[in-house]
Structures are given as structure tokens and as C-alpha cells.
Image (cartoon, rainbow, N blue to C red):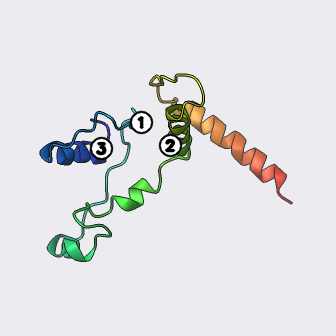
Amino acid sequence: ENDALATKLRKVFASRDTDLSGVSFVYSSQRAQKSLLPLTEEQRQKPEEFGNVANFRLRVLPVLGTQPAIAGVALATQTLLELGIGRHFCPRPAPAPRRALVDKLLEQLRKTEGGSRS
């Protein structure tokens, strides 16, 4: 429900009677904070000329590129666990950090990064 792309893929696989019971998935329980950019009139008229992948919603690919590096860490962790390297892992949802904490950490990072440059 939090991931529009995953929801779409589930519907596509369900319509094709594809069994996904043996497939592991990594996902985020965090709700999307931004939506896709609206299509231009030209894009609405000729969507096939603007997509990178057939039958794939325009402007989805750039959104995927902004996923945080932690997603890669989650994928690597899950892969190692599937290979039997490591202990059982059961992630729990975490509350989103408060805005004041994010601002404080960002300011500390800016000071650290600014102070280390010559």
C-alpha cells in the first residue's frame, strides 16, 4: 500500500497467475513523501515516445534513482541471509525522525563537512 510500483507489479503478476511464494522481497514501510511530476501535454499525447521501458509509467525511473543507499544495504543483508550467512533478521518499522532532529543532524553535518575542507 505504501509503494505504488510494488502495488502495480503485484497486480500484473496476479493477472498472469504468477506464483511469487518463493520470491523474497525487500521493501520500505515508509510512505512516499513526494508524488510523481505531472505529465506535460505532449507526454500525455504520445507517451510511447517518452518512456525508457515499454509499459512503464513516465517519470518513474528518475524517482527510483533517488532511493537512499540504505535500500542497497537492506538488499545485501537479505541476500546474505538467503545464502545462510548470518542470523535470522526480522526488521521492525521505525517511526520517522522528527523534523527538529533532521535539521539538527543536517546542521552538524554541514559544520563537520565545512570544517574539514581547506
Measured Cα–Cα span from mark 3 to mark 2? 15 Å
Q: Is residue 45 above or below residue 95?
A: below
Front residue of this view, candidates 71 and 117: 71
Q: Is residue 96 above or below residue 69?
A: above
Measured Cα–Cα span from mark 1 to mark 3? 11 Å
Q: Are marks 1 and 3 in contact (CB under 8 Å)?
A: no
Image check: 16 left or right of 34?
Answer: left
The kind of residue on which mark 3 rests is Ala
Residue for point 24% across, 70% down: 40
Residue 13 bears which disc, if any?
none
Front residue of this view, candidates 15 and 109: 15
The local secondary structure at tag 2 comes to helix
Q: Earlier in the sequence, mark 2 or mark 1?
A: 1
- What residue would you read off at disc 2? 71
The local secondary structure at tag 1 comes to loop
Q: Are marks 2 and 1 in contact (CB under 8 Å)?
A: yes
The kind of residue on which mark 2 rests is Ala
Q: Indicate the position of residue 118 as horizontal and vertical percent values.
A: 86, 60
- What residue would you read off at disc 3? 6
Callout 3: 10 Å neighbours few (<14), some, many (20+)?
Answer: few
Residue 28 bears which disc, if any?
1
The kind of residue on which mark 1 rests is Ser
Residue for point 75% across, 46% down: 111
Image check: 79 left or right of 7?
Answer: right
Q: Is residue 98 above or below residue 35?
A: above
Front residue of this view, candidates 29 and 40: 29
Callout 2: 10 Å neighbours few (<14), some, many (20+)?
Answer: few
Image check: 3 left or right of 113?
Answer: left
Q: Indicate the position of residue 107 as horizontal and vertical percent values.
A: 67, 42
Q: Indicate the position of residue 6 as horizontal and vertical percent values.
A: 29, 44
Q: State the residue lying farthest toward the right.
A: 118
Callout 1: 10 Å neighbours few (<14), some, many (20+)?
Answer: few
